[in-house]
Amino acid sequence: MKKRHVSVSGVRLKFASAHMATLGNELEPLHGHNYSVSVKVEGTLSNDYWVIDFSKIKSITRNICDRLDHKFLLQAKSNLLSSTLEKETWSLSFGSRIYQFPQEDVAVLDIENSTAELLAEWICHQIDQELFNSKQTNINLITVEVEEMPGQSGGFQLERSLVED
């Protein structure tokens, strides 16, 4: 099988967010990053001889980035960080440290930690769902890189079942 791919990255595939990752039994101080996202999709050519239109994969990725932009990234599956939603306010606690955020300022992510690797995995699964919903069946591999700062990134690859029409 011939392997073909399309890659996108750039100015509009970014989001600025705050987070507190855990490392061992420690919690990082609250801080933020200007994240950059790049995506590579591999697959067979469609009937129009495309793997996917650049504008489509950029639009999907941009919409996901927009959901994270200017939000606190809450790792909802953390074993170390306790989180509760009450009266439109998220309360987070770690030992004696307590934080509160308005609900509209929080992106609740179904991840264990807010590391670049797990953010890449979460974004990758969101892209996969959008491709599934749009019946984009020719793509068999999605790769996502999330860069926290220049030279520092985490990535994730998802193999998909290739379904020919």
Image (tube, rainbow, N blue to C red):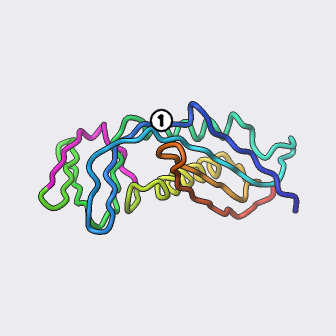
Q: Main secondary structure of the magenta part?
A: strand
Which residue, given by chain and number where applicable, does mark 1 sit on?
66
Q: Tell whether 1 sits left or right of 54.
A: right
At 51% from the left and 36% from the top, the residue drawn is 14
Residue type at mark 1?
Asp
Q: Identify the magenta region.
A: 97-109
Q: Point out the image quarter for the N terminus.
A: bottom right
Q: Nearer the viewer, residue 135 or 99?
A: 99
Q: Nearer the viewer, residue 8 or 129?
A: 8
In the figure, 78 relative to 119: above or below? below
Farthest residue toward the top?
A: 11
Magenta residue check for 99: yes
At 31% from the left and 68% from the top, the residue drawn is 24
In the figure, 155 relative to 25: above or below? above
Q: Position of residue 10 (x, y in %)?
A: 61, 34
Q: Position of residue 22 (x, y in %)?
A: 32, 60
What is the tally of numbered marks visible in this picture?
1
